[in-house]
Amino acid sequence: EPWTFEDYFQQVASGRGIWKWSTALKAYSRHFLTFRGVPVNIAEVGVNSGGSIDMWQSILGAHTYVYGIDSNPKALNLKDSKTDITVGDLSSPTLWQTFYNSKLRGKHLDIILDDGGHDAQHMILALSQGFPHLSPGGYTGVVGRQVNDLLQSAAKELTPYASKNSTSFTAGVHLYPFVLLAQKPSAYAEELNFEGAPIVVDSFDRLWQQLGTSTGGHIVLENPNWGDFMSEQNLA
């Protein structure tokens, strides 16, 4: 069996078609393999001919359920016992409201990806509508050439979830070429605690200098002039 998403993609020689950016496959392997072998619910915009559905279920296992969302009515032919399909206008907030209210009915998702809209407006809509419906430790993300053009808009949508006072705050934002992922904190996440006083530095230059001389210690990179990383300005 293939161990990574890259392995799977390289081995596919027949069956349903699949097309993925190599950077997306690497990001998926880095972040999503933790869901392998456990019940996982995925929503993906742009299931096309169904190759990505096969990928999710082959890599993550038999307990993977995929909610496909597409604008092409032919995608309805992909429905089976482990796959649900919603067809509609990807630019419409009503599509997402109907999906979350009628299809999920309060159920949460572990992964929500827009890898099919390939339109900045569609991608922002998927990102903003999806985040509140993530399970702890879950990811929402967008994939496509448009990612660099929508960073400011994405930051604006994610900023309200950046506060730890929020019940669904953002644990991290991960940016790769053509890929943006935002993650909710895990229900099992704990703050790391270290013995001894930290070495505090205020620049990357000082960080590199300390790395070679602080074996066994811990270094904190902190600069008040940078402001809050999770602010709209800094996220963008």
Image (cartoon, helix red, strand yellow):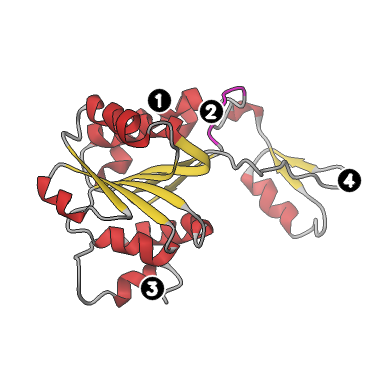
Nearest to N terminus: mark 3 or mark 1: 3
**According to the image, label 1 marks what residue?**
156
Nearest to N terminus: mark 4 or mark 1: 1
Q: Name which quarter of the figure residue 211 lies in.
A: bottom right
Q: Is residue 21 left or right of residue 61?
A: left
Disc 2, SS: loop
Q: CA distance from mark 3 to mark 4?
A: 43 Å
From this view, report whether residue 164 is shown above or below residue 114: above
Nearest to N terminus: mark 3 or mark 2: 3
**Tag on residue 162?**
2
Nearest to N terminus: mark 4 or mark 2: 2
Identified by mark 2, the residue type is Ala
Circle 2 residues within 10 Å: few <14, some 14–19, many ≥20: many
Nearest to N terminus: mark 2 or mark 1: 1
Report the quarter where the C terminus lies: top left
Does the magenta segment cover residue 63? no
Which residue lies at the image location 53% right of the left edge and 57% below the top edge? 34
From this view, report whether residue 216 is shown above or below residue 134: below
Identified by mark 4, the residue type is Gly
**Tag on residue 7?**
3
Q: CA distance from mark 2 to mark 1?
A: 10 Å
Identified by mark 1, the residue type is Lys
Pinpoint residue 96: horizontal percent, then vertical percent.
Answer: 28, 31
Magenta span: 165-170
Q: CA distance from mark 3 to mark 1?
A: 35 Å
Q: Nearer the viewer, residue 229 or 78?
A: 78
Which residue lies at the image location 11% right of the left edge and 50% below the top edge? 74
